Amino acid sequence: MSAPDAAPGGAAPPLLRMRGIRKTFGPVVALKDVDFTVGPREVHGLLGGNGAGKTTLMNVLYGLYAPDAGTIEIDGAPVVIASPKDAIAAGVGMVHQTFLQVDVFTVAENVVLGTDTSGVDVNGRIRELSERFGLAVDPAARIGDLPVGVRQRVEILKALYRGAKILVLDEPTTNLTPQEVDALFGSMRAIVDEGMSVVLITHKIRETMAACDRMTIMRDGAWIATVDAADTSPEDLAARMVGAAPASDETADVALGGTEIGDATLDVPEVTGPVRVVGSRLTVPGTGGKAVVEDVSIELCEGEILGIAGVAGNGQVELAETLTGCRPAHGSLTLDGTELVGRPTEAWLRAGVVYVPEDRQRDGILPGADITENLVLGAHRTRAKAGLIDWGRARREAVEAISEFAVKTPSAATACGQLSGGNIQRVILARAFAHNPKMLLLHNPTRGLDIASTQFVYDRIRAAAAGGCSVIVISEDLDEVIALADRIRVAYSGRLVGDFARGHADPYELGRLMTGVSGAA
Amino acid sequence: MSDFITLTITAMVPFLFVAQGTMLSGRAGIFNVSQEGLMLLGAAIGYLVSLKWGGNLVGLLVAALAGAAFGAILGWATTYLRMDQFVVGLALFFLSGGTASLLYRVVIGADEPPRIRPLPDIVFGQDVLVFVAIGLSALLWWWLYRTDSGMRLRSVGENPKAADSLGINVTRTRMLAASLGGGLMAVGGAYLPMAFSGVYADGIVAGRGWLAIALAFFGGWRPQLILAGSLFFAAMDVLAQRAQVSGIGIPHQFVSMLPYVATLLVMIFAFRWALVPQFLGKNYDRESRITG
């Protein structure tokens, strides 16, 4: 481990040096005097759990957040970056996790937007960059029609087109198949070989080990360490990411998730309880003749966890809503022998079907309502006396739930929308388990959560399954599916394809199914 | 019949200016809803300035400046202050309409208003603003779809965060679009006393401002389609007036309703074309930390 300001590779100044960066959002200190140094020609991993401040630090570098304190030097010269315009001029390019693209524009228009195109052979230049860095795109295609993997290449091209010396990639492997991840890492090498540097923001240790020359670990908005890839191990990184918090041994497992795929899980016996959930030929017609959910059949035993992998936008939201009765569908779904299709959502809930949606803020809570009110939702009829809600009881139960699910909140009367993502998810889980689920469906249950909350969600899911609940986990994080599921299927274009028992799924085979390359169903 | 066409083309002009102004602001994400008031303000200023201080051209210019000032207020309140666009727009509707009425009363009072000279005809019995309005539509199309700066403006209305991340000044772009849009709206209003009545009256705009919002949606926020749509709206306008004056067998209220019905139909069926700017009416805050 070297000090953060030691210039790598001898006397040459580092390409980028950020010093003492401090950023507050109201009372929250998001960055605590962070130092960050990137040398020339290196892939530098910026590693940490969600909420560690990695993206915030890079948003400061890109001029999207104004820091409260701190200095930035590029090639040894101090620079002031007050807006993305300054950042671009200083040679910084950034690919955000949610792509910043204009959907109705073409690839070429998105790439050149904001530049002067007079006298420039735009398409020729884009093609030249595509070839040089292995980033195949069609300049004339409309962005909104393209899959995630291609849109990401466009984002990288945008930065390269502007002559970025430092390319920041924020969690770039989210939503990519293993094959696409390999291709991305190949492009990153090509970029470094041409003399630029790449900052790879990630919470996955496996990725930093595979792709980075050096890495900086952050935790709770603070710099923890900067280490050479050759001098460290996944366990060492996990320990630094998690820190000395209680139960850090357990949570380190989550941080390590996916570093040793499949190996440790082969011994787990297959779940063979009585069949609990049978869905058959579920179909949701879509606009323009193409079904959004097409001919989906599933079967789950008691205590079984079914994982559904897939790239976002392959009908997962619609499937989740279909399987939980939020969206009308054709076909059949029985829970313990009771047919539920065609019945109102309340009947599904009453029968024990509980849904933890992907978009927590939009579909999971009432942001302006307090925790007590959010916990009562869905149970408002059973908690009622003569049509009135028994608020005394609701408050008592809310206080119990807050302590049982370790929700960090000033009180049960705090508006749910003011909580962090991890705490919102804990409230939603508390509500879900208050319904005594027989079938629990979770969609991207740990997206954006810090390590401790992720671990908490995993523990709860496993405990629910151990208690006989049938669990469906739909996730775009392949590692998560592999870590949790007894059986894995893949959502592709509104259908479910593949069917693998725990320990028998090869990530690359799953990747092929996720992109529809392999037709086996 | 040729009379009907001539009248329709004249009636098209206010719709065209105001709808193009609405489109221009909207393309940068500013949804102005104060057209009705800004048109009235334009009519009052256009009339008064023409009458007292130097003729139609000066009247049009001063009206445009006043409209631009109101547009700039909308831009400022929704970018720097991040106030709700709709609420500010409604407030400006009342403020500009009231200002128009007040100015007229202060300058003219309760006297019989003198008529201003109409805009002179150039060719085909049409005045100069007819050609300006059509030329403006072509110019807007060329600017928005053929130039870098037009593409920047459109990107701000579609995804301001993306625009910002590429060094485009979202606030400045929105201020510019809101001001230009407001100016065009007031010009559309100033045309009314100059082409039709010769005098100002508080009821002179008669709902054309609201119709222009519908026209912007009808034309899919595209200058060339708005040009086509304005002909349809103008024809309905002329028909409605005829129905009112001479009676053509249908109640004039029915004809007046048609543009709205047509707009509703277009919006229902064109819903999937995604023709509305994605950030229409939505403010942009760079440091907002709303996580999905």
Image (spheres, helix red, strand yellow):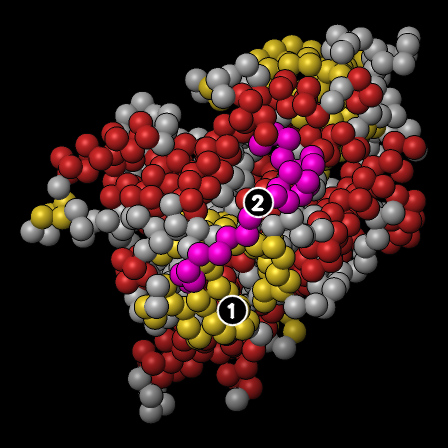
Q: Is residue A280 left or right of residue A381?
A: right
Question: Based on the displayed image, in which of its 4 quarters is residue A370 positioned?
Answer: top left
Using the image as rendered, state which of residue B97 and residue A222 is in the foreground: A222
Residue lying furthest left in this view? A386
Q: Position of residue A141 (x, y in %)?
A: 76, 60
Instruction: Relative to A162, say whether A39 is above or below.
Output: above
Using the image as rendered, state which of residue A318 and residue A341 is in the foreground: A341
Task: Give me the residue at 7% from left, 51% from top.
Answer: A386
Task: Give me the residue at 34% from left, 50% from top.
Answer: A437
Q: Position of residue A17 (x, y in %)?
A: 76, 15
Q: Position of residue A192 (x, y in %)?
A: 88, 31
Q: Is residue A466 left or right of residue B147?
A: left
Q: Which mark is residue A268?
A: 2
- Please report the bounds of the magenta region as a residue range: A254-277
Residue A258 in the magenta stretch? The answer is yes
Residue B155 in the magenta stretch? The answer is no
Task: Say which element carries label 1.
Answer: strand
